[in-house]
Image (tube, rainbow, N blue to C red):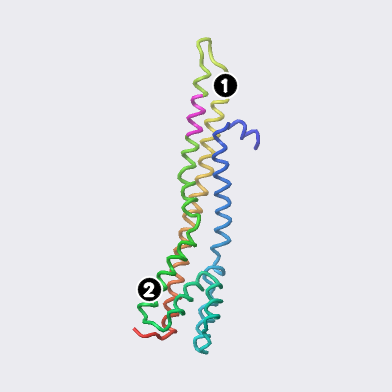
Amino acid sequence: MWEIILAAGWPIWPLIFASIIALAIIGERFWSLRVEIVAPGDLLPEVQNLLNQGTIKKDVIAKIKEHSLLGEIFASALINSNTSAAHIKEAIEESGRAVNFKLEKYLSTLGTIAAVAPLLGLLGTVIGMVDLFSSFTNSGHDVAVFARGISVALYNTAAGIVVAVPAMIFYRFFRSKVDDLIFDMEQQALKLIESMGVRK
């Protein structure tokens, strides 16, 4: 591996740096976008049970808010439980925007890496081609410089693709997962409003 990095030259280092960031984001998003952390299925029945018992107090709402991202949305509805349905929905939408921002954290960076990696690879290719053509002189050509130019060009082209493809795949995957989580939380929030029996 080290021999490949040396053969690829300095243009490979931005790609290595980008790949490390991409791997870190992918690992972090896999951990943070788990359903049991974002929108656990047992929270709605638990809150509905508390509503039926009439034990929703400020300290209980605070615990619900800290429970998960779905809990933040539920808490915004419960805090405004004495208002109209329209006002509660508005509070839920505002909380939902904040939750959506948290769910999409780092995804724009991952998408940028997916888009930029091929360009970084192309930059390495161009630099390799420049080295390649510089090997030609009036007296012939330097075989070592020629070979190094080919190595820099090919390795960087391949590295750009290797970094970009997984980054794009996981970017699309996480975007789809965020959309699914948002839809699920919206449905649960509507069920909570129905359970609260608020006035129109």
Residue situated furthest top in the rendering: 139
Q: Earlier in the sequence, mark 1 or mark 2?
A: 2
Residue at 49 percent of width and 31 percent of height: 125
Residue at 37 percent of width and 80 percent of height: 85
User: Percent x, y for residue 182?
Assistant: 45, 67
Q: Does 74 appear in magenta?
A: no
Residue situated furthest bottom in the rendering: 53
Q: Residues within 10 Å of mark 1 (few under 14, many from 20)?
A: some
Tally of numbered tags: 2
For the residues marked 1 and 2, what is the alpha-carbon distance in whole angstroms? Answer: 66 Å
Mark 2 — residue?
A: 90
User: Percent x, y for residue 112?
Assistant: 46, 47
Q: Tell me: residue 173, above or below residue 153.
A: below
The amino acid pointed to by label 1 is Val
Residue situated furthest right in the rendering: 2
Q: Quadrant of the C terminus?
A: bottom left
Asked if the residues shown at circle 1 and circle 2 are in contact, with their CB atoms under 8 angstroms apart, the answer is no
Find numbered disc 1 in the image and state the secondary structure of the residue it sits on: helix
Q: Quadrant of the N terminus?
A: top right
Q: Tell me: residue 80, above or below residue 143.
A: below
Residue at 38 percent of width and 82 percent of height: 83
Q: Residues within 10 Å of mark 2 (few under 14, many from 20)?
A: some
Find numbered disc 2 in the image and state the secondary structure of the residue it sits on: helix
Is most of the magenta stretch helix, strand or loop? Answer: helix
- Between 200 and 27, the one lying in front of the other is 200
The amino acid pointed to by label 2 is Glu
Mark 1 — residue?
A: 145
Q: Tell me: residue 79, above or below residue 157.
A: below
Extent of the magenta region: 123-130
Viewer-nearest of labels 1 and 2? 2
